[in-house]
Image (tube, rainbow, N blue to C red):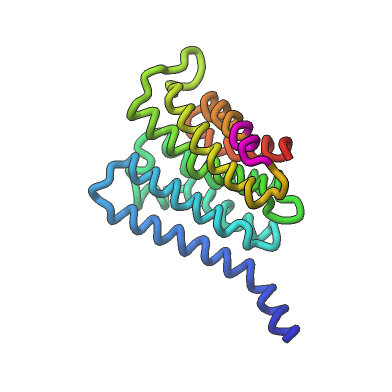
Amino acid sequence: MRIVSAVHTWLQDPLWVLASFGVVWVLVVLARRARAWDPGTKRRFLHIGIGACVFAITPRFQHLAWALVPPIAFIAINASRLLRERLPELADEPAAARGLWTFPLGVAVTYVLFWGDGAGAAVLAGIAALTVGDPAAAWVGRRWGERRFRGFGFGRSLEGSLAFLVVAGVAVGWVASYAAPGAIPLRFAVGCGAVGAAVEAVSPPGWDNLFVPVAVAAAFGMLL
């Protein structure tokens, strides 16, 4: 039994790496076949789908080195022409093309900075904010954004930032409710949501995928 248990433990991280690649492949195939979707919808679908995959699989990893394999691989893949040749509409704008590789870069940097003794609440909070906050801000900002920031924000709107604050705040508060014993979820929701919204608003287009998870994870750690 000890040998079986040791083999299972040794194989656990490589299997989760394979699962990560498998889920992303399925999501990309679905996006390719959804011909009725516009490029923005496809980007949001992949952003949320891949983010949810990262959020679900991250706590399963036992070692940081193995956890870094998928995001580092996707930095290389997404920065190359491979993905853009299969889904050229994802890179129809410079910011969109940049966001393809800054997303896995943001995940990798958050892992490195906040992993500690395992994928803790701060890491999950940063990933949760990246997964749902950014697409919510983009969708609301494009649909209802009328109050554009002047002098900063790169064309972003107050409406989009408020959407980020609310949606990311709810996600981070949920993480705090089960991953940070004794924490007050509302405190983390407001604090991390506000930090994430501010960072998203001032980040150059495409770079928010890197800065948001790192800033939210840092804010989460400070509030613990």
Q: Which residue is drawn at 47% across and 13% down?
A: 150
In this picture, residue 181 sits left or right of residue 98? right
The question of residue 190 being in magenta is answered with: yes
Q: Give residue 123's position: percent from left, percent from top.
A: 65, 47
Vertical placement of residue 109 versus 150, above or below = below
In this picture, residue 136 sits left or right of residue 88? right
Does residue 48 appear in the picture of this structure?
A: yes
Q: Residue at x 66, y 77 (%)?
A: 8
In this picture, residue 43 sits left or right of residue 15? left
Q: Give residue 1's position: percent from left, percent from top.
A: 72, 86
Does residue 108 appear in the picture of this structure?
A: no
Q: Residue at x 42, y 18 (%)?
A: 148
Q: Give residue 198's position: percent from left, percent from top.
A: 56, 26
Q: Nearer the viewer, residue 113 or 139?
A: 139
Predominant secondary structure, magenta span: helix
Q: In terms of image quadrants, where is residue 62? A: bottom right
Bounds of the magenta segment = 184-191
Q: Which residue is drawn at 46% across and 61% down?
A: 23
Q: Which of 29 and 170 is in front in this view?
A: 170
Q: Give residue 174's position: percent from left, percent from top.
A: 57, 46
Outermost residue, left side: 36
Vertical placement of residue 210 versus 124, above or below = above
Q: Nearer the viewer, residue 87 or 115?
A: 115
Report the number of discs. Answer: 0
Q: Where, quadrant-wise, is the C terminus in this rendering?
A: top right
The question of residue 50 being in magenta is answered with: no
Outermost residue, top side: 151
